[in-house]
């Protein structure tokens, strides 16, 4: 039986009405994608040597592809295939069946351009300004936490690892081998288990569960070293929640001096266990602080994996920054949808 345009249109409408498609439907309904154009266009400011050949893909279209890729943790090849294969992805991007789809190399190149131009954080901050303008400013306190993001473990010799720790590239590595080696990732231990990769340090507000700031470091960097760097001013949101890894006498003094109200978990010390009162205080603080875990859980629920497909700190910052921005876009769509239906 011959199919018609109306068959395709009906199939699309049926798919968009289904629950799995609602994330992308909300994003297109509530996100003003054009707010990102100015920042994105800076990578195209170089004059073309001539006007021959195909014009480059629209920067907002390419940015939305990176958001798709980040939301669902897709490789460059996978995102190209999924756009060609899935009606919901084509609809999200505004592409018709007859239109060209950027191939995996084009996706990789665009992300590399954003990474080299260090544009991911400005894009994140640009959306933060929109959130505030839309009435979703940070409220009821800020929660700081970090999650470990794995990368494939490098199989290096002890001598090679020693050179890497000293900031050197092993002389015996060829140029092609060096490109495949991540010399920025580091090991860390958590609950007696070893992890290799990076840390995504985030500041999430209590009211809306939106990521307000973030930083990305090697996994070996202690959480407390990034603590104050990602705090919002106390004048905007004075209550600070964090687990006991962030607590120290110096940190408490610094928070007090900057007019923050500390709700950082008490921690036990050798020969000094927590009192019953401290345990009770920690339990009360946990009822609020647990909301930050919902953020990491939400990211994993969509992406299905915390693994980063990149090599080096610069690219990890780019990919995790996109993951944080994608989460905020998704969260904003959910909150605006709840407002509209309420």
Image: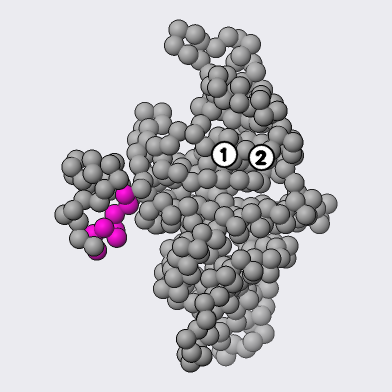
Residue 64 horizontal/vertical position (percent) = 58, 67
Q: Which residue appears at 58% of the width and 9% of the height?
A: 275
Neighbours of disc 2 within 10 Å: few (<14), some (14-19), many (20+): some
Dot 1 corresponds to which residue? 229
Residue 14 horizontal/vertical position (percent) = 66, 71
Q: Is residue 186 magenta?
A: no
Specify the segment rendered in magenta: 176-183
- Which secondary structure, mark 2? loop
Residue 173 horizontal/vertical position (percent) = 20, 56
Neighbours of disc 1 within 10 Å: few (<14), some (14-19), many (20+): few
Answer whether labels 1 and 2 touch (C-beta < 8 Å). no
Quadrant housing residue 261: top right
Q: Which one is nearer the viewer's eye here, 26 or 116?
A: 116
Q: Quadrant of the N terminus?
A: bottom right
Q: Which mark is residue 232?
A: 2
Q: Which residue appears at 61% of the width and 22% of the height?
A: 253
Q: How many marks?
A: 2
Side of 156 where 116 appears, left or right: right
Quadrant housing residue 181: bottom left
**Rendered image coloring scheme:** one colour
Q: Which residue appears at 52% of the width and 45% of the height?
A: 215
Q: Is residue 178 magenta?
A: yes
**298 is higher (above) or lower (below) than 93:** above
């Amino acid at each position: 039986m011959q199919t018609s345009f109306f068959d395709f249109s009906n199939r699309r409408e049926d798919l968009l009405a289904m629950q799995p498609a609602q994330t992308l439907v909300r994003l297109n309904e509530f996100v003003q994608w054009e707010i990102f154009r100015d920042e994105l266009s800076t990578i195209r400011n170089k004059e073309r040597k001539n006007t021959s050949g195909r014009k480059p893909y629209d920067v907002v279209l390419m940015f939305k592809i990176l958001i798709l890729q980040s939301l669902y943790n897709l490789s460059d090849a996978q995102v190209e295939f999924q756009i060609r294969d899935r009606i919901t992805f084509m609809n999200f991007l505004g592409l018709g069946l007859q239109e060209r789809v950027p191939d995996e190399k084009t996706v990789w190149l665009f992300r590399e351009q954003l990474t080299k131009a260090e544009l991911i954080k400005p894009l994140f901050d640009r959306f933060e300004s929109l959130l505030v303008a839309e009435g979703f400013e940070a409220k009821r306190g800020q929660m700081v936490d970090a999650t470990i993001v794995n990368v494939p473990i490098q199989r290096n010799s002890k001598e090679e690892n020693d050179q890497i720790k000293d900031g050197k590239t092993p002389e015996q590595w060829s140029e092609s081998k060096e490109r495949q080696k991540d010399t920025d990732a580091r090991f860390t231990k958590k609950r007696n288990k070893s992890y290799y990769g990076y840390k995504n340090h985030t500041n999430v507000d209590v009211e809306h569960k939106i990521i307000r700031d973030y930083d990305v470091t090697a996994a070996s960097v202690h959480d407390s070293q990034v603590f104050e760097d990602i705090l919002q001013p106390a004048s905007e949101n004075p209550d600070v929640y964090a687990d006991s890894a962030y607590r120290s006498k110096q940190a408490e003094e610094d928070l007090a001096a900057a007019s923050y109200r500390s709700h950082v978990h008490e921690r036990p010390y050798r020969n000094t266990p927590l009192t019953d009162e401290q345990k009770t205080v920690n339990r009360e603080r946990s009822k609020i602080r647990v909301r930050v875990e919902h953020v990491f859980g939400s990211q994993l629920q969509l992406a299905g994996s915390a693994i980063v497909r990149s090599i080096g700190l610069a690219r990890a910052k780019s990919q995790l920054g996109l993951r944080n921005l994608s989460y905020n876009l998704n969260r904003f769509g959910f909150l605006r949808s709840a407002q509209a239906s309420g």
